[in-house]
Image (cartoon, helix red, strand yellow):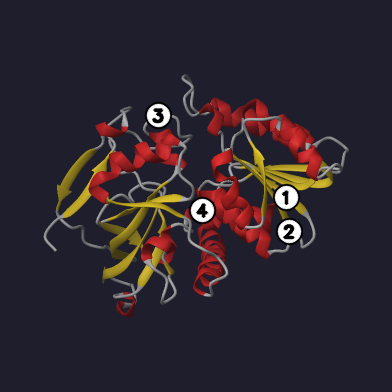
Amino acid sequence: MTSATEIVLPGVVEPEGLEIRHRPVPAPGPGQALVRVEATGVSFAEQQMRRGRYYDQPAYPFVPGYDLVGTVAGTGPGVDPALAGRRVAALTKVGGWTTHAVLDAADLVPVPDGVRAADAETVVVNGITAWQMLHRHARVRAGQTVLVLGANGGVGSTLVQLARLAGARVIGTASSRHHDALRAAGVIPVDYRGDVTAQVRAVAPDGVDAVFDHVGGAGIVASWKLLRRGGALVSYGTASTRDDTGNRQLPVLKLLGRLYLWNLLPNGRRASFYNVWGGRALNRKRFQARLGADLTAVLEAMAAGRLAAQVAAELPLTRAAEALRLAESGTVAGKIVLTP
C-alpha cells in the first residue's frame, strides 16, 4: 500500500478533462480512519461541479465523489482499533473518487454482511436522501399517492422502492424507454416529455399527497399545483439549471424564496427544500446520529432483500471520465458505480 490513486477535477472541463493523480496513502489522524475504497459513485452533483454549478462546491482543483463504500484499513488515535477490517459507508460530498480516503470515524456507517460494496454504494447518498425525504419531510403514509420526478434516476429508483415499501401508490416520470421497468417495480409511469400534469391528473384527479422534485426551475410550479390539500412538496435540486451560466447560487436562492412564500399560503399544503447536509453545522452529533440511523435502515432493507440495488453500470475508477459522460447521457437507469 504505497500509493493512492485519485481522480482530480481541475476546473470547468468536459469529462475527458478529469485527471488521474497518484500520491502517498494518507495516514489517519486523531478520531479518523483510513478507508480502502471499494466502490464510489457518480451523482448529479459531479455533473454540476464540473460545470462550476454546484451550490457550495470547493475551489478547483479537488477530488470529486459524493459518497463511498470501503473497508477500514487503519485507525488513528482515539479510534477503536476493532474498527479495522469493517466494511463501512460514508457520505463525503467531495473526495470519494479515490482508492484511499481518510474520514472521521464518527461519520462511518457499518455495511451489513452479505451486501456487495457496489450495491451498498447505490444507496448511500441516494438512500439517505430518499429515506429522509419520504419519512422525515413528506411523512408519507400507507395508502397515499406520491409523484416521483425522474423515477429511473439514482435517487428516484431508490425512492420509488421505499415509497412502495411504505405502502404508497407511486407515479413516476421517466422517458418511455424506462416505463416497462417502472411498471415491473409497481410504479405508474408518466412520460416526462408529454403533459405531465394531465397524465398525473388522469391517475389522481384530486392531486397527490407528495411530490419529490429534483428539477426545480419554472416546472416547480406544476409540482406545487399537483398537490391535494394536506400534501407536501419536497424539492431537492435544480437539475433544470445544470447547463445555465451565471451565479450558481441564484437558482437555489430563487427556489428557496418561492417555497417559503408558498408555505405562507392558507391552503393546507406545505413545501420544503431537502439538503442532505441540513443541520450539520448546527449540531454535528445529532446530524451523524440521524444519518447513521437512516442509512442503517436502508442498508438493512437491502440486506433483507426488500430493497434492490439499481446499478446502471460498474466501471473502474480510472474510467471516471467515461462514467461521467454516461451519467450525463440520460440513457441509463440507476446509479453508475466506480470500483477502485
- Of 172 and 125, which appears nearest the observer? 172
Q: Earlier in the sequence, mark 1 or mark 3?
A: 3
The residue that disc 1 covers is: 146
Give whichever of discs 1 and 2 has the lower sequence position.
1
Q: Which residue is mark 3?
A: 52
Count neighbours of disc 2 (C-alpha within 10 A) and say few if under 14, some if 14 to 19, many if 20 or more: some
Task: State the mark number for residue 126.
Answer: 4
Report the amino acid beneath label 1.
Val
Secondary element at image label 4: helix
Q: Nearer the viewer, residue 337 or 33?
A: 337
| Image height of 44 relative to 130, above or below | above
**At x 39% / y 28%, what residue is drawn?**
51
Task: Determine the CA span between mark 1 and mark 4.
Answer: 18 Å
- In the depicted view, which residue is nearer to us: 185 or 62? 185
Residues tagged 1 and 2 counted as in contact (Cβ below 8 A): yes
Dot 3: element: loop
The reply to whether callout 4 and callout 3 are in contact (CB within 8 Å) is no
Q: Which tag is nearer the camera, tag 1 or tag 3?
A: 1
Secondary structure beneath disc 1?
strand
Tell me residue 207's x, y (percent): 82, 42
The residue that disc 2 covers is: 168
The residue located at (48%, 50%) in the rendering is: 334
Question: Image height check: is 145 above or below 58?
Answer: below
